[in-house]
Image (spheres, rainbow, N blue to C red):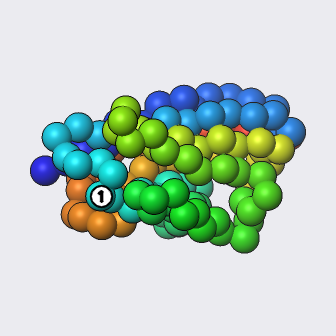
C-alpha cells in the first residue's frame, strides 16, 4: 500500500512562510486528488486543502488566501505553500490521497512562534 513522504516543516515566526512537499511512488499520481491535513496538539486531524489531478483546488476557510496547494505530476509531488503563518497553524502536516486508501505518512512538524 502507498505511503506518502512529507517534508519541509520547521520552526518559523508568525508572519513567516514555509513550503511543504509530499511525494509518493508506485502509483499513477496524476489520477489522485491529493489533500493536505494537519493535526494540532490535542486535536483531531483536520483537512486543510486539496487539489485534483487537473489542478482544481479547495481550501479550508482558516487558510484561504494564505496557503496555496499545487502539484507536479511528473515528479509525483504535491506542495503546500504557507504564507502569513499564525501560531494556530502549528501542528503535524500530512498529505493523503482522497482517491484511494493510502497509509498515512509520518507527517512534517510545523511550529509557528508568536
Q: How many residues crowd mark 1 within 10 Å: few (<14), some (14–19), many (20+)?
A: some
Q: Point out the image quarter for the C terminus.
A: top right
Q: Seen in the image, is 32 located left or right of residue 39?
A: left
- Residue 102 lies, in percent from the top left, at 24, 56
- Does 76 sit above or below residue 10? below
Residue at the image point whose x is 70% and y is 51% from the top = 67
Instruction: Answer whether residue 43 is visible to the viewer in this image.
Output: no
**100 and 84: which one is in front?**
100
Q: Secondary structure at mark 1?
A: helix
Give how far across and how far down residue 105 sits, in percent: 33, 44
Which residue appears at 13% of the width and 50% of the height? 1
Corner quadrant of residue 25? top left
Q: Residue furthest left?
A: 1
Q: Is residue 73 visible?
A: yes
Mark 1 sits on what residue?
Answer: 31
Residue 29 lies, in percent from the top left, at: 29, 48
x and y, in percent, of residue 107 in the image: 43, 42
Q: Which one is in front, 26 or 36?
A: 26
Question: In the rendered view, would you say 107 is above or below 55?
Answer: above
Where residue 10 sits, quadrant-wise, is top right
Amino acid at each position: 500500500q502507498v505511503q506518502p513522504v512529507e517534508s519541509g516543516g520547521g520552526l518559523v515566526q508568525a508572519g513567516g512562510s514555509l513550503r511543504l512537499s509530499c511525494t509518493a511512488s508506485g502509483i499513477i499520481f496524476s489520477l489522485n486528488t491529493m489533500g493536505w491535513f494537519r493535526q494540532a496538539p490535542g486535536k483531531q486531524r483536520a483537512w486543510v486543502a486539496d487539489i485534483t489531478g487537473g489542478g482544481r483546488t479547495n481550501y479550508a476557510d482558516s487558510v484561504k488566501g494564505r496557503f496555496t496547494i499545487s502539484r507536479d505530476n511528473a515528479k509525483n509531488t504535491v506542495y503546500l505553500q504557507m504564507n502569513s503563518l499564525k501560531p494556530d497553524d502549528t501542528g503535524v502536516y500530512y498529505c493523503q490521497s482522497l482517491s484511494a486508501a493510502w497509509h498515512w505518512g509520518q507527517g512534517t512538524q510545523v511550529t509557528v512562534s508568536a
